[in-house]
Image (cartoon, rainbow, N blue to C red):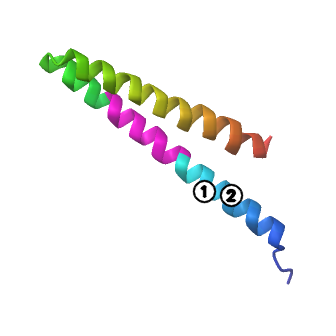
Amino acid sequence: MTSIGPELLAESLQLIVYTAVAGVLTVGGVLVEQASVQHLGTGETMIALWLAALGGVMLYAGAYGLGYKKVLSQYV
């Protein structure tokens, strides 16, 4: 039976953390975008635009910044 080296353990832990943070940011971004659409429907345009910008940043950071650049780049 082989033991896991500290380098492999550190890299695996880093990958798990990046994946979890990317998932939280992406799901949070979708929820903020949904809240933006709801505020837009009630006529609160300024809040809707603010939430849309915040949701866009969260989606970009989660899906592209961490998900694609950090997590998927380790597999390819």
**Which residue carries the number 1 mark?**
17
Tag 1: residue type? Answer: Val
| In this picture, residue 8 sits left or right of residue 39 | right
Q: In the image, which disc is placed on residue 60?
A: none
Q: Position of residue 21 (x, y in %)?
A: 53, 49
For the N terminus, the image quarter is: bottom right
Kindly state the secondary structure of the residue where label 1 is placed: helix
Decide: is 1 above or below 74: below
The kind of secondary structure element at disc 2 is helix
Disc 2 designates what residue? 14
Occupied quadrant, residue 29: top left
Residue 42 coordinates in the image, percent (x, y): 13, 20
Q: Nearer the viewer, residue 38 or 58?
A: 58
Which sits in the foreground, 23 or 55? 55
Q: Distance between the residues labelled 2 and 1?
A: 5 Å
**At 74% across and 65% down in the image, what residue appears?**
10
Q: Is residue 30 magenta-colored?
A: yes
> Which residue is painted at 80% across and 40% down in the image?
76
Residue 31 on the magenta span? yes
> What amino acid is labelled 2 in the image?
Gln
Q: How dense is the environment of label 2, judged by Cα within 10 Å: few (below 14), some, or many (20 and up)?
A: some
Above or below, 46 relative to 55: above
Percent across and percent down for residue 45 are 22, 15
The answer to whether the residues at label 2 and label 1 have Cβ atoms under 8 Å apart is yes
Residue that extends furthest to the left in the rendered view of this protein: 42
Task: Give the quarter of the image for residue 66.
Answer: top right
Span shown in magenta:
22-33
Main secondary structure type of the part rendered in magenta: helix
Q: In this view, does 6 lie to the left or right of 70?
A: right
Q: In this view, does 30 lie above or below 49?
A: below
